[in-house]
Amino acid sequence: MATLYEYYNTGNDALAVLTTTYWKAQSFTPAISHKITSVKLYLAKTANPAGIITVSIRATDGSGLPTGSDLASGTTDGDTLATPNEWREITFSTGYNLVAGTKYAIVVRGDGTTNEFRWLVDISSPTYANGSFVASTNSGTTWANETDKDMMFEDWGVGYSLSQAYIIG
């Protein structure tokens, strides 16, 4: 059974627009090592088609910006989002072992057919201390921290022992 680990799920007061080129991310730092198996995001469909939404976990650089390739990823059909918004769970097929105290990013993007969709955000009084909102206007080529905002997210997973974290194969 999955356990809720990191989250920021109250205080939403705005919508961040996502498209094929406008990617958004939320950095987060797990307090407990675990295997992330899914995330829940507070999403909104604004028009049809919303298209396929890809959600992934990426490592971050020293500034907390997403870097490298996806460590885990999953998709959801944005056309099936409720109006005006809903919590949507995106499952990662393989999951990924997160290390406590290490910053990661939840990266969200649309496919080439997407019109647009939105991810709910707290812009007036964000309080998530272990990460921040991150944005890209060029499909993830470059990123910028916006530390005065936090996206609505939940990190779900299962525990693992340190010996399991380093098993290869």
Image: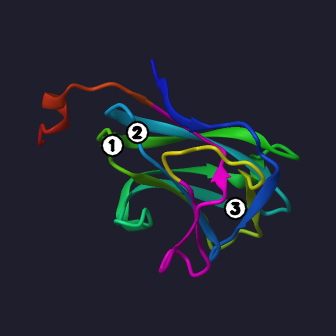
The residue indicated by pointer 1 is 101
User: Residue, x 65% and y 59% (percent of image)?
Assistant: 148
* 145 falls in the magenta region: yes
Left of 129 or right of it: where is 97? Answer: left
Distance CA(mark 2)–CA(mark 1): 6 Å
Question: Which circle's residue, 2 or 1, is located before the other in the chain?
Answer: 2
Residue 30: mark: 2
Q: Amino acid at mark 2?
A: Pro
**Quarter of the image where one finds residue 25:** bottom right
User: Residue, x 72% and y 52% (percent of image)?
Assistant: 121
Where is residue 66 drawn, in percent x and y?
Answer: 43, 65
Distance CA(mark 2)–CA(mark 3): 30 Å
Q: Where does the magenta region start and end?
A: 132-156
Q: Quadrant of the N terminus?
A: top left
User: Are discs 2 and 3 less than 8 Å apart at CB?
Assistant: no
Left of 114 or right of it: where is 63? Answer: left
User: Are discs 3 and 1 less than 8 Å apart at CB?
Assistant: no
Bin the neighbour count of mark 2 within 10 Å (Cα to Cα): few under 14, some 14-19, many 20 and up: some
**Depth check: 127 or 49 in front?**
127
User: Residue, x 43% and y 30% (percent of image)?
Assistant: 157
Q: Quadrant of the C terminus?
A: top left
Residue 147: mark: none
User: Are discs 2 and 1 less than 8 Å apart at CB?
Assistant: yes
Left of 130 or right of it: where is 166? Answer: left
Q: Secondary structure at mark 1?
A: loop
Question: Which circle's residue, 3 or 1, is located before the other in the chain?
Answer: 3
The residue indicated by pointer 3 is 51
Question: Which circle's residue, 2 or 3, is located before the other in the chain?
Answer: 2
Q: Secondary structure at mark 3?
A: loop
